[in-house]
Image (spheres, rainbow, N blue to C red):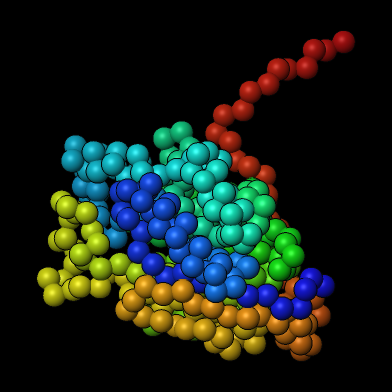
Amino acid sequence: MSSLTCSVAVVQATPVLFDTPRSLQKLADLTSEAARKGAELVVFPEAFIGGYPKGHDFGVSVGIRTPEGRDEFRRLFENTIEAPGPATEFLGSVARDHSVHLVVGVVEREGGTLYCASIIFGPDGALLGKHRKLMPTAMERVIWGSGDGSTIPVVPSKLGRIGTVICWENYMPMLRMAMYAKGVELYCAITVDDRETWIPTVRHIALEGRCFVLSACQFLRKADLPAGYPLGRFSSSADVLIRGGSCIVGPLGDLLAGPVYGEECILMANLDRADLIRAKFDFDVTGHYARPDVFRLHVNEQAMKSVTFGREKESG
């Protein structure tokens, strides 16, 4: 077992929508602050780099796309990142400069497709793993593609085994089971879901998986939106558009920090890794509490490519 205790931080903050360089700098400043407080792992919310365009419809209705919507997508696209690429090199340098493990929600581009993703960095700056959201939710499917089984890593670290699951993927029982089977100990549930139902969700996951859950949610006010941003989907009286609700949960479902609503913040907790084994005394979901004679899950971890190239083998 790794060192018995570690200090972790969950960041609840507002990115600079459609201005990725400024979002990266804000992330660097917040990471520095968390590291000064003793954090060894710092977790940022879903789509913190690249942006979550809440309330945007990109000019889409059934059978109709508008020229204005295409240009709005272009604007979004231009503020996303490549992974690996210059932005991940910067993020790696932030992790290295502060000797922290770093989990960051990003919007990644590959070819002409965007993916909601999360990236894990080691304290030496190395990119340890990338996860692409398997199933974008509702309107998200217009702007994001779907990941595949090749990007659901759980990576070993001196703090424990780190994995990430994004927003409503956490409602996919088979994905959760795959994470548990990979031995996830620091389960990073990054999100923009600020509803009351989110907290029982992550508490259930911690109790089910007997793991620590670090849930990072964005915070967003109407005043933070850039000029010209469409406001038609929001109530005229609304000020806070994403209210947060970040928290840290122990492996028996107990709240160790948060939830916090209505402000930017950095939540801290000291984790005792021995609690992982204490919790599994009476429930190990992929071990002594499993019934493989009745239920089994197959996970396809092969990357799915639309085009492959090769030569036919010569006969004779």
From where the camera sits, is residue 135 visible? no
Q: In which quarter of the image is the C terminus?
A: top right
Decide which of 198, 19 is in the foreground and name it: 19
User: Residue 241's quadrant in the figure?
Assistant: bottom left
Q: Position of residue 40 (x, y in %)?
A: 63, 68
Query: Going by the image, does 103 lie left or right of 316?
Result: left
Decide which of 41, 252 is in the foreground and name it: 41
Decide which of 289, 180 is in the foreground and name it: 180
Q: Where is residue 87 in the image (x, y as percent from the top left)?
A: 48, 44
| Relative height, residue 66 to residue 157 (above, below) | above
Identity of the residue drawn at 67% across and 44% down = 302
Identity of the residue drawn at 20% across and 64% down = 223
| Relative height, residue 131 to residue 74 (above, below) | below
Q: Position of residue 13 (x, y in %)?
A: 39, 67
Question: Which residue reaches farthest front?
Answer: 36
User: Residue 84's quadrant in the figure?
Assistant: top right
Q: Where is residue 282 in the image (x, y as percent from the top left)?
A: 76, 89
User: Residue 109's quadrant in the figure?
Assistant: top left
From where the camera sits, is residue 72 visible? yes
Q: In which quarter of the image is the N terminus?
A: bottom right
Query: Going by the image, does 57 lie left or right of 98?
Result: left
